[in-house]
Amino acid sequence: MSDGDQPGDDPALAHLYHSQKNRTFVRAIQGEYGLNAELRRLRSMPRVRKANEIKFVDGPQAYSRHYVEPKDGIAQTFHLHLEEYGPGGKSQKHGHVNEAAFYILDGRGYEIHDGIRYDWSAGDVAIVHNNCVHQHFNADPDRPARALVIKTKPMYLFLNMLFQKQVEPRATTAAPGGEAFTAREEETDHNHPAEGY
């Protein structure tokens, strides 16, 4: 990568969701528009998204399953996705204007926000505040961690508050100990430990 390139410009990373520049962040509002027609369209949309119909993307350290985003036509102002971090895995390092909330479904890990570490475990909510450079880490070298992420990024972009910067892209190699890990597409335990909480 040359000095002028951004991490998202690397052709070797082009297949990763978070490296794609042609994603739909805000749906176009164009053509004929009337409230009745829009209500008919919205009422015809699915009210339940089936996880088994949405596959994880990216990897091998951080995987994402995008349930709701503007390109789906269901919602315009928020983005909902599941993040799964492989054993010892981490996300890309990046910053953006919008807030995000990470509800930790299972595992243990930590965040680095503007150089400060914040630890988390299952049941916690990690809050990414506006305009902070951050990265998410799975602290367990043997087990994965999952978080349900809700963010208002599409609304910020809709309002032309466009700042987002990737500082370090998602890793393209597994973390030590996570070489054989793949995202848990199908589950039977629904993230609950056999021994209970």
Image (cartoon, rainbow, N blue to C red):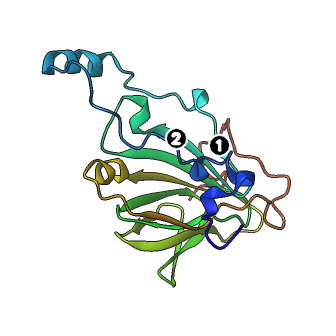
Q: Which residue is mark 2?
A: 66
Name the residue rendered at 60%, 52% in the picture: 19
Which x, y percent locates residue 110? 56, 73
Task: Indicate whether 74 appears above or below 85.
Answer: above
- Classify residue 90 by image quadrant: bottom right
Name the residue rendered at 62%, 65% in the picture: 5
Q: Which residue is mark 1?
A: 57
- Residue sitting farthest toward the left: 35
Left or right: residue 58 versus residue 123 is right
Contact between labelled residues 1 and 2, with CB atoms less than 8 Å apart? yes
Q: Secondary structure at mark 2?
A: strand
- Classify residue 166 by image quadrant: bottom right
The amino acid marked with disc number 2 is: His
- Quarter of the figure with the C terminus: bottom right
Q: Residues within 10 Å of mark 2 (few under 14, many from 20)?
A: many
The amino acid marked with disc number 1 is: Val
- Quarter of the figure with the N terminus: bottom right
